[in-house]
C-alpha cells in the first residue's frame, strides 16, 4: 500500500503562466524555467497515469515499467514537437489496438509533488527526485530546467527556443 495520497492530482497541479500575460511583469531572476511542451498533461500516482480531471490513461504495463511507486510525478505524455493530435490519439483511443503506439511516447516529468509521503519539499529537491525516479524507466525522463538569470535571459530563450 502506498504511503502517499493516491489521488493527489485532485489537489491540483502546477500550471505554467505565460510571462507576457502577467502585468506588471515581475523580475524572473532565479526562476526555474523549461520548454513549454505540447503534449498531454499526466499525473503518475505510483500506479497509474491520470489526467488533470482525474481520468485514468490506460497505459500498457510495459510503458509504466520502472516508474516509482513511492514518488508521484507530474508531467506530459509527449511524442514530439507539433505532434499534439497524434499524442492525443494514442492516449485517448488505447483499447489494446494501439498499445504498440505507446512506444512513440515519453513521459516528460517536471515535478514530483509527493516524494515518499512528503509533499513539503522545495522545488530543487523535488526536481532531484524526478531525475532519480525516471532513471530506471525506459519511457520517462526529466524535463530540462535552468535557472533564469534575468529578463534578457528569458527573452533570449523565448526567441531561440519558443
Image (cartoon, rainbow, N blue to C red):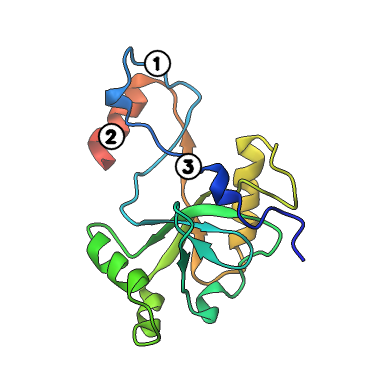
Which residue occupies the foreground of this view, 162 or 118? Answer: 118
**How much space separates mark 1 and mark 3, taking CA atoms?**
19 Å
Residue under the point 61% across and 50% down:
8
Which residue occupies the foreground of this view, 77 or 4? Answer: 4
Q: Position of residue 154 (x, y in %)?
A: 34, 28
Q: Looking at the image, tell me whether mark 1 or mark 2 is earlier in sequence order.
A: 1
Q: Quadrant of residue 18?
A: top left
Is 125 rendered above or below residue 37?
above
Quadrant, the C terminus: top left
Is 48 rendered above or below residue 117?
below
Residue under the point 36% across and 26% down:
153
Discs 1/3, front: 1
Marking on residue 158 = 2
Q: Residue furthest bottom?
A: 97
Q: Looking at the image, tell me whether mark 3 or mark 2 is earlier in sequence order.
A: 3
Which residue occupies the foreground of this view, 131 or 72? Answer: 72
Can you identify the residue that label 3 sits on? 145
Can you identify the residue that label 1 sits on? 26
Residue under the point 37% across and 32% down:
17
Q: Position of residue 81 (x, y in %)?
A: 26, 57
Amino acid at each position: 500500500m502506498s504511503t502517499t495520497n493516491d489521488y493527489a492530482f485532485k489537489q491540483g497541479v502546477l500550471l505554467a503562466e505565460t510571462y507576457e500575460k502577467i502585468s506588471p511583469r515581475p523580475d524572473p531572476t532565479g526562476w526555474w524555467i523549461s520548454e513549454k511542451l505540447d503534449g498531454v498533461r499526466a499525473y503518475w500516482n505510483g500506479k497509474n497515469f491520470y489526467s488533470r480531471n482525474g481520468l485514468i490513461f490506460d497505459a500498457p504495463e510495459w510503458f509504466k515499467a520502472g516508474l516509482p511507486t513511492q514518488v508521484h510525478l507530474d508531467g506530459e505524455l509527449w511524442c514530439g514537437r507539433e505532434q499534439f493530435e497524434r499524442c492525443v490519439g494514442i492516449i485517448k483511443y488505447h483499447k489494446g489496438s494501439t498499445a504498440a503506439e505507446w512506444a512513440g511516447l515519453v513521459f516528460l516529468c517536471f515535478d514530483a509533488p509527493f516524494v515518499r509521503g512528503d509533499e513539503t519539499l522545495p522545488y530543487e529537491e523535488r526536481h532531484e527526485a524526478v531525475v532519480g525516479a525516471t532513471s530506471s524507466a525506459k519511457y520517462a525522463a526529466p524535463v530540462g530546467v535552468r535557472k533564469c538569470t534575468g529578463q534578457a535571459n528569458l527573452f533570449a530563450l523565448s526567441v531561440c527556443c519558443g
